């Protein structure tokens, strides 16, 4: 037997681990991507070379004209701005508003002038409308605290299960939804009338529908997304089972819902119909709607390059051409849009920085040393464990 | 590599017309080799799965532009192998920069099945990603050196020299195991 034949046989005997499991995991994503694409009619397919040539001419013309040069310049700036020199201190926010930062040692409030205060040793917190209160959780406890009164507790409840993912409704702030183990419960904004709404729900934070009549989206343990009217407890709609999401995010007008899971993103309309879906590589991800629009920013991690990209997509039946915003090596950890809609806060975990990206221009402001600023002790464990996992910028549509 | 069979052309035609079952047939036919090729180049099970999956997603996105008279395999393998080389290079750079804490030996090399394969896997691990890629394309996916040169955008002489050096090293390992 020749050495080549021997090598060929030896190589072909090697089994990649989990080859079949990998196939089973990958197929639903490939299938979802296939279903969400718009098939092109045959004659259009034949036009591709002509279209490509036409596009080439347009790109060349654009690059040679001054608006074209500006566009090319802005893209280049965005790509190379990872070398932007970070500020050592957060002296002010680039836009009006107030941040709620969930860190490993509790939630913090950050004012426009950069001053910050820890609100207590709670596990996580979420704004009430207009940032008057923060609803917080820890162990079996749910509480509403006043950030202007050094975190004074206004009311609190103890429950039998682990309490987490409390979210205040935006309409007059008169309801708080939260998880008690695998039970979804709702309590009035003054801490009264607490009661169960659904059993066997997933750990995904529920999401109030803006503009809805106290309607709440949540995920069941088998990955169905359900919209329920919390007063009547009637189900408005429910999807088929699927991957359990990590994030449910409504557009500001309540007409679009993003269902982000580890391996997929589904875009639903207000009636629960899927507009499109796409598969994702395992890795950090996140989504945030641009204010007053159906466009949204998504973090997309590429295992092949080890980089995270920020891309802009559209929550319409046609997702449109994706627009590249920014890219950097490593993981992006959190997204928040400023109340005026002009700035995007991105947590760049590996660099221990927050990046403030101006959405309407190629401007980036970076602030370093974020983990330490929010109470992480120096050099304890990997940075990803110490970096604040979530931020909301009051008062955006989705906390 | 031979051209596409009648069956594969039918699957591509069906998938382009919107048939999910034809796409699934194409996927099931090509997944094992694409996944294995990525695994042999990157030597990391999770990354290999992601790379193979990304390659199929890229293929789905570009399905309408695909000329169905051409074979699907080389189109897919070009994506898989180039992404695998990029990933392996990036990992090596990160290690050089001290950003990755795991040691070489800690990567998930999976169940390598038999003594020969273990030796071959170890031998592959000792090659540079670019050399691993040409070995995998030649001896797992069975492309000719000319086809490999096309797939990787390399001069044919470079492909031949990478093959020769890689093969010499692997042959040493096979010899040692025979003794």
Image: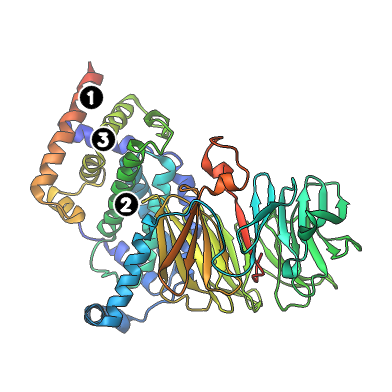
Residue at (72, 48) in percent of width and height: A123
Secondary structure found at label 1: helix
Q: Which residue is mark 1?
A: B173
Q: Is residue B106 left or right of residue A212?
A: left
Name the residue carrying label 2.
B83
Give the residue pinned by disc 3. Answer: A9
Q: Please report whichever mark, 1 or 2, sits nearer to the chain's N-terminal start.
A: 2
In the rendered image, residues at marks 2 and 3 fall on the same chain: no
**Distance CA(mark 3)–CA(mark 1):** 15 Å
Residue B158: in sight, yes or no?
A: yes
Q: Is label 2 in a helix, a strand or a loop?
A: helix
Q: Residues within 10 Å of mark 2 (few under 14, many from 20)?
A: many
Tag in front: 3 or 1: 1
Q: Is residue A164 above or below residue A98?
A: above
Does the CB distance between marks 1 and 2 fall below 8 Å?
Answer: no
- Foreground residue, A338 or B77? A338
Q: How is the image coloured?
A: rainbow
Q: Residue at x 25, y 47 (%)?
A: B141
Do pointers 3 and 1 mark residues of a single chain?
no
Dot 3: what SS?
helix
Q: Chain of mark 3?
A: A
Residue depicted at x 86% and y 54%: A156
- The residue nearer to you, when weighing A27 against A251, is A251
| Cα distance between the residues tagged 2 and 3 | 25 Å
Q: Which mark is residue A34?
A: none
Q: Quadrant of the N terminus of chain A?
A: top left
Q: Residue furthest top?
A: B179
Given contact means CB atoms under 8 Å apart, are the residues at marks 2 and 3 in contact? Answer: no
Q: Position of residue A155 (x, y in %)?
A: 87, 57
Report x, y in % for residue A293. Answer: 56, 79
Name the residue rendered at 44%, 63% in the picture.
Answer: A364
Please indicate whether residue A269 sits to the left or right of residue A33 in the image.
right
């Amino acid at each position: 037997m020749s050495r080549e034949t021997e090598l060929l046989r030896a190589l072909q005997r090697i089994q990649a681990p989990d080859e079949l499991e990998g196939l089973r995991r990958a197929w639903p994503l490939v299938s979802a991507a296939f279903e969400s694409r718009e098939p092109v009619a045959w004659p259009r397919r034949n036009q591709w070379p002509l279209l490509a040539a036409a596009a080439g001419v347009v790109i060349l013309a654009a690059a040679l004209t001054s608006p074209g040069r500006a566009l090319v310049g802005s893209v280049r700036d965005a790509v190379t701005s990872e070398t932007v020199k970070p500020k050592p201190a957060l002296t002010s926010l680039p836009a009006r508003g107030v941040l709620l930062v969930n860190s490993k040692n509790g939630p913090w409030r950050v004012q426009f002038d950069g001053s910050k205060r820890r609100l207590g040793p709670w596990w996580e917190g979420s704004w009430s409308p207009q940032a008057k209160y923060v609803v917080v959780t820890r162990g079996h406890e749910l509480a509403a605290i006043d950030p202007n009164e050094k975190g004074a507790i206004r009311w609190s409840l103890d429950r039998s299960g682990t309490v987490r993912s409390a979210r205040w409704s935006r309409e007059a702030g008169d309801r708080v939804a939260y998880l008690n183990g695998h039970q979804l419960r709702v309590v009035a904004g003054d801490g009264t009338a607490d009661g169960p709404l659904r059993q066997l729900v997933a750990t995904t934070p529920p999401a109030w529908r803006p503009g809805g009549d106290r309607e709440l989206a949540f995920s069941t343990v088998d990955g169905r997304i359900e919209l329920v009217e919390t007063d009547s407890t009637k189900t408005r709609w429910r999807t088929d089972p699927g991957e359990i999401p990590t994030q449910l995010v409504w557009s500001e007008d309540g007409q679009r819902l993003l269902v982000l899971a580890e391996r997929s993103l589904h875009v639903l309309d207000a009636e629960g119909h899927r507009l499109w879906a796409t598969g994702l590589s395992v890795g950090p991800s996140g989504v945030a709607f641009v204010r007053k629009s159906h466009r949204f920013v998504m973090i997309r991690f590429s295992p092949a390059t080890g980089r995270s990209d920020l891309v802009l997509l559209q929550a319409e039946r046609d997702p449109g051409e994706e627009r590249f915003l920014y890219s950097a090596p490593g993981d992006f950890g959190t997204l928040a849009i400023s109340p005026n809609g002009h700035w995007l806060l991105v947590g760049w975990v590996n660099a221990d920085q927050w990046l403030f990206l101006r959405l309407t221009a190629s401007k980036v402001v970076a602030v370093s040393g974020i983990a330490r600023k929010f109470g992480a002790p120096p050099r304890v464990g990997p940075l990803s464990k110490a970096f604040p996992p979530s931020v909301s910028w009051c008062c955006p549509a989705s906390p | 590599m031979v051209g596409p069979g009648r069956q594969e052309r039918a699957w591509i035609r069906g998938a382009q017309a919107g048939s999910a079952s034809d796409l699934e047939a194409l996927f099931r036919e090509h997944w094992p080799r694409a996944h294995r090729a990525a695994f042999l180049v990157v030597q990391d099970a999770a990354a290999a799965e992601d790379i193979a999956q990304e390659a199929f997603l890229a293929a789905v996105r570009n399905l309408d532009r695909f000329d169905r008279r051409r074979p699907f395999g080389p189109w897919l393998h070009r994506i898989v192998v180039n992404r695998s080389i990029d990933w392996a290079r990036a990992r090596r750079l990160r290690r050089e920069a001290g950003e990755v804490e795991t040691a070489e030996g800690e990567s998930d090399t999976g169940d390598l099945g038999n003594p020969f394969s273990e030796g071959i896997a170890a031998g592959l691990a000792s090659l540079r990603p670019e050399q691993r890629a040409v070995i995998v394309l030649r001896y797992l996916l069975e492309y000719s050196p000319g086809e490999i040169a096309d797939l990787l955008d390399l001069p044919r002489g470079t492909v031949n020299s990478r093959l020769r050096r890689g093969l010499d090293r692997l042959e040493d390992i096979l010899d040692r195991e025979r003794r």
